[in-house]
Image (cartoon, rainbow, N blue to C red):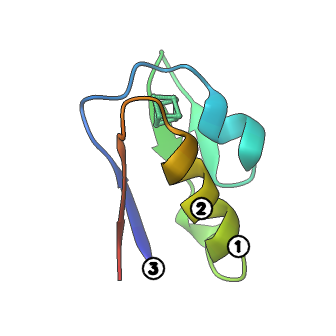
Amino acid sequence: MHISISSKCVGCGACAIINPEIFEINSNFAVVNPNFISGNEESCIDAALECPVSAIQILG
Ligand code: SF4
């Protein structure tokens, strides 16, 4: 699984609340730590579904 954050991100922090190991807010923009995706795919999908602007793109 590969995750990218689109420029639509508004830095709301919802993804980081759902999975703080993978999503971090840096200067009002989400960044992804890919090291913790493996084994946490379901919470990544949850974060993508919860993102208010659909900025979390999941590939693979
Ligand atoms: S939930 Fe979406 S808009 Fe909010 S910080 Fe995460 S990627 Fe950005």
Q: Is mark 2 within 8 Å of ligand 1?
A: no
**Who's the residue at 72% across and 82% down the image?**
39
Q: Is mark 3 within 8 Å of ligand 1?
A: no
- Circle 3 residue: 1
Pointer 3 and pointer 1: residues touching (CB < 8 Å)?
no
**Quadrant assignment for the C terminus:** bottom left
Front-lying residue, 58 or 2? 58
Front-lying residue, 20 or 43? 43
Pointer 2 and pointer 3: residues touching (CB < 8 Å)?
yes
Q: Is residue 56 above or below residue 2?
A: above
**Who's the residue at 55% across and 19% down the image?**
12
Q: Secondary structure at mark 3?
A: loop
**Who's the residue at 75% across and 36% down the image?**
17
N-term-proximal mark, 2 vs 3:
3
Q: Is mark 1 within 8 Å of ligand 1?
A: no
Give the label on residue 16, or none.
none
N-term-proximal mark, 3 vs 1:
3
Front-lying residue, 50 or 33? 50
In 3D space, how far apart are the residues under numbered discs 3 and 1 (Cα atoms)?
Answer: 10 Å
Kind of residue at badge 1: Asn
Q: Position of residue 14 (x, y in %)?
A: 64, 31
Kind of residue at badge 2: Cys
Q: Which residue lies most toward the left here? A: 7
In 3D space, how far apart are the residues under numbered discs 2 and 1 (Cα atoms)?
Answer: 6 Å
Kind of residue at badge 3: Met
Query: In the rendered view, does 25 fall on the left or right side of 30?
Result: right
Disc 2 crowd, CA 10 A, few/some/many (<14, 14-19, 20+):
many
Pointer 2 and pointer 1: residues touching (CB < 8 Å)?
yes
Give the label on residue 40, or none.
1
